[in-house]
Amino acid sequence: MSSRITNLVLASITLALVLAMQLSAVSAAGPSPDFSITVSPSSITIPITSSGLVQLTLASLTSFSGKVNLTASSQPTSDPVLVLGASNLTLAAKGTASTWLNITINYNVYYTVTVVGTNGALTHSATINVNPGSPHTDFLVTSNRGSMITARGLSDSAQITVTSLHLFVGTINMTGTVTPAVANVPTVSYSPASFPVSNWGSYTTTMIVQTTPLTPLGNYTILVSATGQTYAGLTTHSIKLNLAIVNSGFSISADPSTFDTGTTDSDGTVIRVVSVNGFAGIVSLSASVNPKAPGVYIPVTARMFPDNLTLTPNGENDSLLIATVSGSVVDSYDITVVVNDSGLVRSLVITFQVDAAQYRSYRTIDWLSATKGISNRLLINVLNQTSFLGPVSLSAKIFPTFPNGPVISFQPSSLNLTSLGWNTANMVVTTSTATPLGVYIVFLTESSGTMRLSPVAVVLTVETPIQFGLAVSPASFVVEAGFGVSSSQLTVTNLGSNSGQVIISASYDTTALGVVLWRNPSQYYLANDPLDISGYSTGILTVAVTSGHNVATGNYTVLLTGTSGNITHSIVITFSVINFGADFLEARVYQVGDAYPGSTTQLEFDFSDIGTLSMMVQDVQIQAFNRSTFHISNPLVLMGGENKTVTTTLVIPSTVRPGTQILIFFVQWQFYNPVTSQWTGANPLQFYGNLTIVSSLTSQHPPPQPPPSIGPSTALTGFAQMLRNIVSVIAGGPGILPVLDGSFQETFLVTAVGVYASLVSLAGLLYLRQTRRTRTRRAS
């Protein structure tokens, strides 16, 4: 008994010790290490298109230490740009760590931004309420010139651009001041001085700095100011430009001051640089097309040829601005030409127009090639816009100049002008076997200084002849009359190892056709503009042919001629002009035999191909007898001008009633289009016809009754027979009316006599009856 008590006591003590140890362990564990995340501020208002900063703070709890990864997201997710200062923070035990969250919004939307911190299984988050505020509209002012150097007595210019910031929309007014304010200080103006700036857009104006011959030499500061209405009220932003006035320099001008070109073409103008106050040196030239708007593609390139000029004291020199347009719409573009000599810079903005080809005014630049040892010529137009009648003479300046270089002359050498109209002369280029190969510019002028020349400059290429071959594919094709278009590819192959040039010309009937040569799919091939072809390679032109509006159908040719010096080759493209409007299918239908209920009849279809195109009758549908449909499904092919006949059997339903039935015919057909080399569906033919249904195959009308003989009995018999015939006809049976035959007069006479005799007899009977009644009354 005592041993049991002892064991029970020991077990109880052991259990108590175990429970005590567990409670001690639980009490010793305490809270687990953790961290917290807070944001400041928790609610923020950010102007639209602007940014705001929120501070993120992590704090260690219960001696937590380690790296916490940070992420940020928004709801809705469409707009805010969220940028964390750090993607993770490292916390020391009982420490804190902070970073920034940059929030940018662009729309008038309320957002909730959630920042999440993660360390293993531990995750905590904090939210930020983002409220949109009114945008802090503003604008930015920039210039393409940081400093300017100008010779006194001249003007200079710079491009000033104002760009919208934070949804700014409004009108900008420009002002400018020059310091120090001395006598004859340079003046500043703008073109335009006031202009609108659109949302997210920009506008560029030209600042013009004007000096006088008395402007003191030295350094000046230009304060360029732009004023507009922003969220803060009337706001002015300014930039400063340095201006140095020197004694000598140069001026630039363009002649003509503007020009036009085709949507895919090249043209330009002459840029003249003039030394002022004894300036001498080499100046560089560049040209760039001003953008329409940020990021907008401009299908125009500009270059200067040559791109540097040597000026002698008080001398002048010319360069050629060439603008090449590749597939532009009708529009206008600005080109900035810059002439630079170290810090001495002159710029000029030229506006030119891109027109449809038929609206171009006149060409300012043309191209010509000449082969060593021979001459070539180009027609020069002289437009007189005055009453001056001349004479005037033409002259030319060629660049560069070399011994044995090309020689320019004019035929005639002097022109007597027509008043207010065009006059022409030939510019003749003569070369020798010693003439250096290469590209030259011929600048043209006229003696009066009042005429308008077309062109004003010619790009001349002196070359050696090359052996070449011509090939076209396809060599023949078909084009539709009335502005139909088709094309072929001309390949010019250089058969030698030396590079050279080939000029292509086209001869054709200009009253019937239009032919355009394309250097590539987006650039016209200019007349006399040679193809540059390196050794054993090819040049390709696309030949586009358009038929005239009233061109007659038939066969035509285009003669393509290639010339390289005294070497000439030709090739012919042949094509046919067709007129779809003159080709059609004619259909006729004939009935063969009688048609009666339950029978069959023959229908003969006569099809005629009117014109030159091949045609195919695919199907004929006949609707008749309460819209029952019958098909002729055998295709019938006809060549141009051919006639074919098809016979088909038509079953007459036994239930059809005698009389006229209306038949509707539908003809499905195609014609062969030689332009596309495919069969093309044509509009279906629909027409109507009448089919006569008789009672039966043996149905015949009764023969006319013979003329009756004259007599009472015969007349009464004929009268009765006539009544029977009338009843029969009314009832729908066969019969004729004898009153329509030749015995009409005799029948009528006999009938009238019989009726009259009957009436007389009736009157006599009535008289006798009345007499008897009278006698009876008297007797009584």
Image (cartoon, helix red, strand yellow):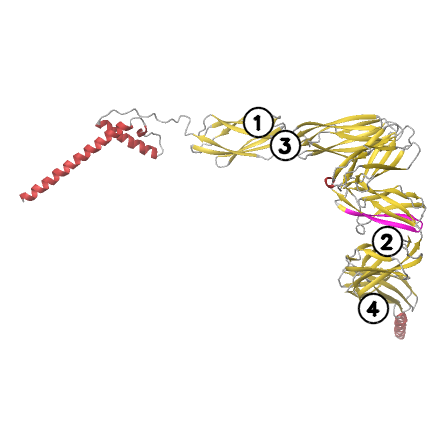
Q: Quadrant of residue 519?
A: top right
- Asked whether the viewer can see residue 27, the reply is yes
Among the two numbered marks 2 and 3 on one chain, the one whose residue lies closer to the N terminus: 2
| Residue type at tag 3 | Phe
Is residue 677 covered in magenta?
no
Residue identifier under label 2:
158
Residue identifier under label 4:
41
Relative horizontal placement of residue 647, taking residue 108 as reference (left or right): left
- In the picture, the disc for residue 608 is 1
- Nearer-the-camera pick, 321 or 33: 321
Do the residues under discs 1 and 2 have CB atoms within 8 angstroms? no
Q: Main secondary structure of the magenta part?
A: strand
- The segment highlighted magenta reads 332-350
Residue identifier under label 3:
580
Q: Tell me if mark 2 has few (under 14), some (14-19) or many (20+) residues whose alpha carbon lies within 10 angstroms of its own.
A: many
Which quadrant, please, contains the N terminus? bottom right
**Nearer mark to the viewer, of 1 and 2:** 2
Whole-angstrom CA distance, mark 4 to mark 1, is 91 Å
